[in-house]
Amino acid sequence: MKILILSGSHPRHLYIHKEILNSGHDCAAIIMHRENLLPIAPTGTSDEVNKLFKFHFSERFKVESKYFGNISPREIFSDIPSIYCNPKELNSSKVADYARHFGADLAFIFGTDLIKRPLFDALPSTKINLHLGLSPWYRGSATLFWPFYFLEPQFAGATFHQIVPEADAGAVLHQFATPLYMGDGIHDVGTRTVLQARKDLKELLTGIDREGWIYAEQKTSGRIFLTSNFQAEHLRVIYQTYENNIVDHYLNGHLAQRVPNLIRSQLVQTCSVN
């Protein structure tokens, strides 16, 4: 099988795509350069909130580095045909021509911006996106942050779905809610989501050769979060009001206990990464 990888440049994206490279399939890659892993707070942010902003992203960097390392796209994709682009170039004719020329049977997407035409039309009919978030409840951007902000960490998870022109709205192949443990902070859950997603991806890739994939349409539109929706002030809820103990509050029964009705592939065994 020929698999076209569409990847962001962050270590979490590369960690996932290494599983595809290990699968033995014929691969090529399109890599989109992402923003700095340690962003700068917007101009006008107060000193107090700026400290929270720096702390939040430095902690994410520290936790993710522990599990994903400091790997680079040039290192990971050195042995396969690859093309690099910035976000403005992603949906260009040049990148679309590259995808069309490779002639993939499957496109697997994790970490890029929204795929639009002409690139969308150049991809094969099977084009699976790994969305770090549970669709339809949390679609769009920062969808492992918003469940914490809205005090429902049980809605942190990941969704494997077909891509359509709308963000995270395609038919679902598989999804899971991330296991939660006492003492978890927001970045512990985020990192565990990626670890679990790679494990589930390995089983899905084995299953497509043996049994094929079955999808379920999303029945509601849910909520779409834009990058612009996130404000540094939102971090007050995580770190000042709840001192990054939102998971403990949920597990102790102090927060609403509603749970998502998940779509799970029969190809994936029900177990978790601890």
Image (cartoon, helix red, strand yellow):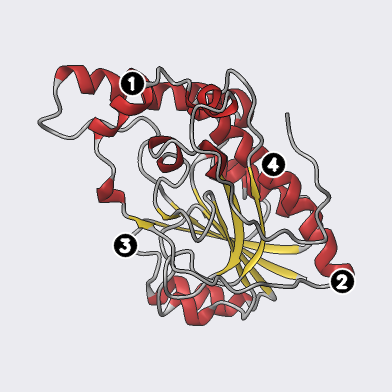
Q: Nearer the viewer, mark 2 or mark 3?
A: 2
Alpha carbon of mark 1 to alpha carbon of mark 2: how far? 48 Å
The mark nearer the N terminus, 2 or 3, is: 3
Q: Nearer the viewer's eye, disc 4 or disc 1?
A: 1
For the residues labelled 2 and 4, say whether their Cβ atoms are less than 8 Å apart.
no
For residue 235, side relative to residue 81 (left or right): left
Residue 65, numbered circle: none
Residue sitting at x 72%, y 70%: 2
Q: Which residue is mark 4?
A: 196
Q: Which residue is mark 2?
A: 211
* Image disc number at residue 88: 3
Residue 100 vs residue 250, the one in the foreground: 250
Between marks 4 and 1, how big is the CA–CA gap? 29 Å
Q: Earlier in the sequence, mark 1 or mark 3?
A: 3
Q: Amino acid at mark 3?
A: Lys
The answer to whether residue 109 is left or right of residue 206 is: left
Who comes first in sequence, dot 3 or dot 4? 3
Say if 138 sits above or below 124 in the image: above
Q: Residues within 10 Å of mark 3 (few under 14, many from 20)?
A: few
Disc 2 crowd, CA 10 A, few/some/many (<14, 14-19, 20+) = few
On screen, residue 192 above or below 54? below
Q: CA distance from mark 2 to mark 3?
A: 38 Å
The image shows residue 3 at horizontal and vertical percentages of 68, 67
**Front of the two marks 3 and 4:** 4
Secondary structure type for disc 4: helix
Q: Earlier in the sequence, mark 2 or mark 4?
A: 4
Residue holding disc 1: 241
- Foreground: disc 1 or disc 2: 1
